Image (cartoon, helix red, strand yellow):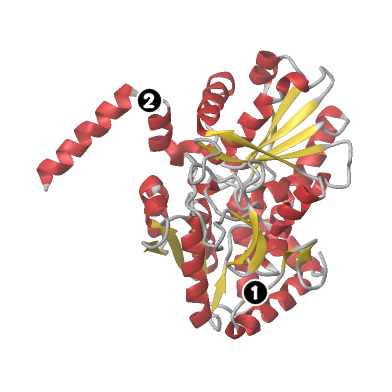
Amino acid sequence: MNTEGYYGTFGGTFIPEILYPAISELKKHFEQIQSDPGFWNRYNEILGNFSGRPTPLTFAAGLTEYFGHGKIYIKREDLNHSGAHKINNALGQALLAKQMKKTRVIAETGAGQHGVATAIVAAKLGLDATIYMGREDMERQYANVFWMKRYGAQVVPVDFGSRTLKDAINEALRDWVSSFETTHYLMGTASGPHPFPALVAYFQSIIGKEAKEQILELEGSLPSRVYACVGGGSNALGMFQEFMNHTEVELVGVEAGGRGPEQGAHASRIAYGQGKIGIAQGYKTLFLQNDEGQMLDTFSIAAGLDYTGISPILANLSETRKVRIEAVTDEEVIEALKLVMTKEGLVPALESTHAFAGAFREMSSNAAKDSIIINMSGRGDKDIFNIAEGLKDDEWTAFIGRKQAQYERAR
């Protein structure tokens, strides 16, 4: 990254003039905390006694035996308080907001996990919170909406555009323009104008730091491959950064292939080769867009992956071949989910299951001595409706039908 926040040709700061004071203030404080051991100690202390870090690196004995090609390890970010990696970044930015004397945070969310994490840290640290969420995502992830509200956050539905993550980001940016004197925009993914990509990646780097120490202790050597799902890019960058300088470790990001490569049926910017360089939401990266630069609709079974853009850091790492980007379809995701549940007794989030599906597809290429790490960025209890639909569960369908009938009678 250069001083202007560019990663190769990607990144930068493309914002209205009115936001420059807020961005300048954020850059200044971000630079300060990086050399402030007191801040980092406070951050680690709260993550340890409140969120439950370090999260374990679990040996997947059942899956390892099933595939018979090397050892599989799972980084258990699902065991964080809130059930996902999102709290790592939310806590760090909330502490930063307090340092900047802000009294309010705003956030965008897709799957809802960042919204929940933001609501939790706001309650913990005494901040007001407003969370923007596309109406489509609210309907898919209502359990998370329920919890955000219970923690005291205001949840604002976004009813324009595709009513998903990109639209929630747009609405949060509009809020910030008029409220930055008292408000910090607690962005959840490693995208947006500089310094947000670097800031989010910084707070998520704890994932890879722990995983590297853990695999060396367990195996005495580094893994041959590391897998993570890729939406905006926060969990992938959190895992990948610590392994970046080890060329013997292949880093594999897995995008949402949805129903396949047809336009509007997926959220794969890189693997399907359909992302085009553009500038939107404050930064330059690869977006799914038409020839006029209008953002295309996206689709994924996982609400947290259906973002039209990608972190400028990951766009650069893919272009320079330091990270390999693949895509898996919803069908592959459901099959991978079945395996993880029945072989390991775990229910990964549908986002995380993309990483499992990508790894499973390539297991036959591993040697017996190899080990791989899969980042389980979140747990799947939030996805119960989508999982039941994907599994075509007749009992669940009948249950929902009865509840719908009860609701209609009550009306």
Instruction: Give the percent coordinates (x, y) of residue 305.
Output: 55, 47
Q: 319 or 233, which is in the foreground?
A: 319
Classify mark 2: helix, strand or loop.
loop
x and y, in percent, of residue 78 in the image: 58, 40
Distance from Cα at disc 2 to Cα at disc 1: 45 Å
Q: Amino acid at mark 2?
A: Lys
- Whether the residues at callouts 2 and 1 have beta carbons within 8 Å, the answer is no
Which-is-in-front pick, marks 2 and 1?
A: 1
Q: Is residue 38 above or below residue 112?
A: below
Quadrant position of residue 43? bottom right
- In-image side of 287 versus 404 (left or right): right
Q: Which mark is residue 392?
A: 2
Say which of 289 and 68 sits in front: 289
Image location (x, y in percent) of residue 16: 59, 81
Residue in the image at 50% along x and 54% along y: 296
Residue under the image location 49 percent in, 37 percent down: 380
Residue identified by numbered label 1: 14
Work out which residue is located at the far front of the displayed protein and give it: 291
In this rendering, position of residue 45 left or right of residue 4 = left
Q: Alpha-carbon neighbours of circle 1 within 10 Å: few (<14), some, or many (≥20)?
A: some
| Side (left or right) of 183 relative to 235 | left
Question: Does residue 116 lie above or below 184 as drawn?
Answer: above
Label 1 secondary element: loop
Q: Which mark is residue 400?
A: none
For label 2, the crowd category at 10 Å Cα-Cα, with few meaning under 14, some 14 to 19 and many 20 or more, is few
127 is higher (above) or lower (below) than 384 = below
